[in-house]
Image (cartoon, rainbow, N blue to C red):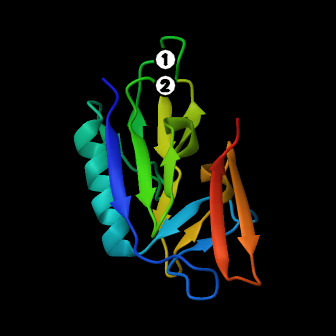
Amino acid sequence: TQHTIWWCTDDCIVGRCQIIIDSGTTLTYLAKDVYDEVANAVANVINHECFYPAKQDYLCHHVENNGDPYEGLPEMTFHFTNPDWNLPPSNIFRMVESVITCLAIKDGAVPIFGNVVQPNMHVKYDLGKRLLSLAPAE
């Protein structure tokens, strides 16, 4: 069964943004309280042991690799003022070994959408109108 985790942010307009969209940053960073909610939601959905590897602070899980390494991992949807940013598991988890996947989201002082969440999306920055547009890449 595919689960979806919903996370909302109000008002992401370029220049007055609560989260930075940055293709030059690999991971996604969320405020600690938001990250904790997301990590808890992910842990509650995945039926595998959660752990933090030594010397790293990534939330990881053991998974069964039956051909699709992302099978059973949740999707995530970020809600902005108008568009929704729907993320498949491959955009929020990173396979670090054939049977270990880690959440590509961490807590950070500055909220940033990194490039791991951006594949398969067209992101348009209209600095003149101070708007951000999202569209799925077909």
Q: Which mark is residue 99?
A: 2
Check the image and report above or below for 90 versus 121.
Answer: above
Q: Position of residue 114 (x, y in %)?
A: 63, 61
Q: Nearer the viewer, residue 91 or 53?
A: 91
- For image coordinates 47% across by 52% down, the residue present is 54
Q: Position of residue 128 (x, y in %)?
A: 77, 84
Tell me if 49 is positioned left or right of 57 in this view.
left
Quadrant, the N terminus: top left
- For image coordinates 67% across by 82% down, the residue present is 130
Q: Position of residue 42 (x, y in %)?
A: 32, 46
Image-quadrant location for residue 36: bottom left
Q: Is residue 107 visible?
A: yes
Q: What type is the residue that disc 1 sits on?
A: Asn
The residue carrying mark 1 is 65
- For image coordinates 53% across by 75% down, the residue present is 19
Q: What type is the residue that disc 2 sits on?
A: Val
- For image coordinates 27% across by 50% down, the residue present is 41
Q: Is residue 55 visible?
A: no
Crowding at mark 2 (Cα within 10 Å: few <14, some 14-19, many 20+): few
Asked if the residue under mark 1 is in contact with the one under mark 2, i.e. CB atoms within 8 Å, the reply is: yes
| 2 vs 1, front mark | 1
Q: Secondary structure under badge 2?
A: loop
Q: Position of residue 107 (x, y in %)?
A: 45, 69
Q: Secondary structure under badge 1?
A: loop
Q: CA distance from mark 2 to mark 1?
A: 6 Å
